[in-house]
Amino acid sequence: MTSAKPFLSSTLLCYNPSGMAQTKLSETAWLKQQIVKLLKAYNRPVPIEKIGREALYLTNADNVLIGAILQDLLAGDARFIFRSDNTLELAPDTDDSRLLSEAAFVVIDVETTGGHAYRDRITEIGAYRVYRGQIVNEFNTLINPGVPIPYWITALTGIDDRMVAGAPRFSQVADALLDFIGDSIFVAHNAPFDKRFINAELERDRGVCLGNANLCTVSLSRRVVPGLDNYRLHTVADYFNIVIDGRHRAGGDALATARVFIRLLERISFYGVSTVGGARRFRLTQSHNLI
């Protein structure tokens, strides 16, 4: 994680005891995610001095300064609990207890040069923010992968080297993407694939990775609408009468996934599911059909 130090240090150099107005949202989100990862790794209250040293790279700061920084950084964030013994811990079931009706979701799809996250590169990102059952914002961009796009990928997606020649590199859109994602729940159709690619790009560029909670619409679809022939995106979309405008393009697939996700949330809400944890555990059974 040494390559992350310059990034985190640049954030802390902006620190002002009266607030963190100079700190960019993406940097703040990253710092919070690093703290979450550290607290999860220890699985117990952690002294703020250790957090300052291991998550914020403050090797020479005293507890008073570290405490002030953490109080500003984490103000109003219900995931964190400050204890009277100068330790910090995560609130119980931080992610699972989030209400579906109040949580923000970012539904993401990526197109890539291949299937291996640490060998291949992203060529396009499509993302839609979902809040209270509505699509409220979007983020779409081609990405110059810096490597040739294989012909079979072009045949599938229509994205070729000429299309991405003038597109930004991932490092040029990383801040905007992180701002867009924030602390939202990360949603994708086969979420491990998309998140693995985004994390691989972030690790190459920043030495860090996303700490956001996940929901996978493949898994959720299997549990909410069992019995489909398969759970490819077009099959699930067809089930809900959702048209995919731009199959195998990040924007089109992400938009269709967002619409599918909203329909899935409506279904599980009907059966009384109200939290992220409930969505992860829900499975339609014969007893549900009696409701």
Image (spheres, rainbow, N blue to C red):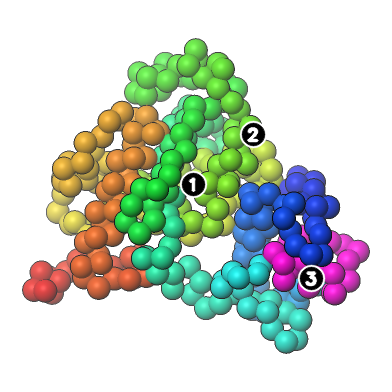
Residue drawn at the location 37% of the way across and 24% of the way down: 157
Q: Is residue 162 left or right of residue 26?
A: left
In what element is the residue under mark 2? Answer: helix
Check disc 1: other Cα within 10 Å, few if <14, some if 14-19, many if 20+.
Answer: many
- Along the viewing direction, whichever of 109 and 74 lies nearer the viewer: 74
Left or right: residue 123 compared with residue 21: left
Magenta highlight on residue 128? no
Picture coordinates of residue 167, whole percent (x, y): 55, 22
* Residue hosting label 2: 171
Q: Please state the extent of the stretch shown in magenta in the rendering.
A: 50-73
Residue where numbered disc 1 is placed: 195
Position of residue 256 in the picture relative to residue 66 (left or right): left
Q: Decide whether residue 58 is among the magenta residues.
A: yes
Answer with the quarter of the image where residue 245 lies. top left
Is 160 rendered above or below residue 129? above
Quarter of the view holding residue 47: bottom right
> Mark 3 sits on what residue?
68
Q: Is residue 227 visible?
A: yes
Tally of numbered discs: 3
